[in-house]
Image (cartoon, rainbow, N blue to C red):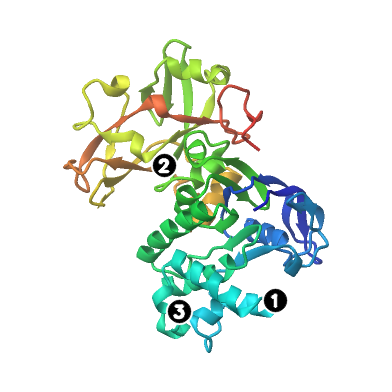
Amino acid sequence: MAEVALTGVGKVYPDGTRAVTDLNLTIADGEFLVLVGPSGCGKTTALRMVAGLEDISEGTVTIADREVNRVPARDRDVAMVFQSYALYPHLSVRDNIGFGLSLRRIPKAEIREKVDKAAQTLGLTEHLSRKPRNLSGGQRQRVAMGRAIVREPQAFLMDEPLSNLDAKLRVQMRAEIARIQRDLGVTTVYVTHDQTEAMTLGDRVAVMKKGHLQQVAAPQELYDRPANLFVAGFIGSPAMNLLQGRLTGDAEDPRIEVGGQTLAVPGRVLRERPALAAYLGRDLVVGIRPEDMEDSELAAAGAGGGASLTSTADLVEAMGSDVLVHFAVEAAQVVTEDTKELARDAGTDVLGHLEAPRTDLVARFSPRTRVKVGDPVTIQVDTGRLHFFDIETGASIWESAAGSPREDEV
């Protein structure tokens, strides 16, 4: 096990394309860190630089306090698990897992012992004599992980290892990977596009966009206190609702005006976010998590101090444990580089309603709601849990002035 550190790391390809810029990350000994972001954000490139599969253009990478910039991949003592299983079809599971040890001329008895131990950890003992073609996708991925485990490396590097599995298997393998990493205590860097994987697996999660690190923090910290608009919109499913509003009133009775409707905000919100006082009378971006909205007919009496929005249900999705209600308000869309990037990643059109001020929102209602498509609906909003962002910089507004990150922000 070892600490992995990236200091000022950058990657520029020969054609001038910059994939990673000034990446500073320290993964503690035994930590599970997840790199997450949209396709093309530089997360896989960063991982490959740690592995030695990509040259480092700028900065340094250290593993166990040893700079490895010019150390060949085979000598870095890290094991990589790829998106593809890369198993040898003509070899048994046992031989696939032990293949790397055989190349290093490890004694056969020791190989057998290590393979048996890894197989037991991964639940593969009864499959050791089988060929990869006779295994399920999840079992093949366990074999690929077993090949990494037997090496007993200083760090595991995993590049979207679950992307080829169906949804049910992904959930199962997420739990397996978390258990194995916890049992082995090996420093792990895990790359994924799936923010659900990131939130459920990582001790910490690092969010990247266009080669730049946006924020690194514990999963719940990212969710509750995103550093900027991009992190806020990327982390969470369904995504945080973002709309343009104006902060009015005063420090004792603040209000948010959105598209002709007004939301009363508890006075404690400004006390908890001192920098927000500077935005009184100004436009800003308001963020509302879907779970912070409820059907007013089901909401606790008096909750939110009468803070509610009225609209019409455009789409109702019954999920079993909850109901997703889609509706719109007559508020200007938030159109920034961050929201454009989020829209591209989601495959949606952020400029779809510019002909008329309209923003589509999603609320997570209790399954007891009776709202149907086309029904008028009153949405109770927990305004004590609103998020606020500077409309120019996209920075989250908390204790410090917008654009001045806290220690855990980048």
Where residue 108 sits: x, y (%)? 61, 79
Q: Is residue 113 visible to us here?
A: yes
In the displayed structure, would residue 84 be above or below residue 385?
below
Q: At 39% from the left edge and 47% from the top edge, which residue is drawn?
A: 238
Element class at badge 1: loop
Residue 359: mark: 2
Q: Earlier in the sequence, mark 3 or mark 2?
A: 3
Kindly identify the amino acid type of the residue bearing the numbered disc 1. Answer: Arg
Residue 128: mark: 3
203 left or right of 317 in image: right
The residue to which callout 1 is attached is 104
In the displayed structure, would residue 156 be above or below residue 88?
above
Element class at badge 2: strand
Q: Earlier in the sequence, mark 3 or mark 1?
A: 1
Kindly identify the amino acid type of the residue bearing the numbered disc 3. Answer: Leu
* Mark in front: 1 vs 2: 1
Whole-angstrom CA distance, mark 3 to mark 2, is 55 Å
> In the depicted view, which residue is nearer to us: 357 or 40?
40
Q: At 79% from the left edge and 53% from the top edge, which residue is drawn?
A: 66
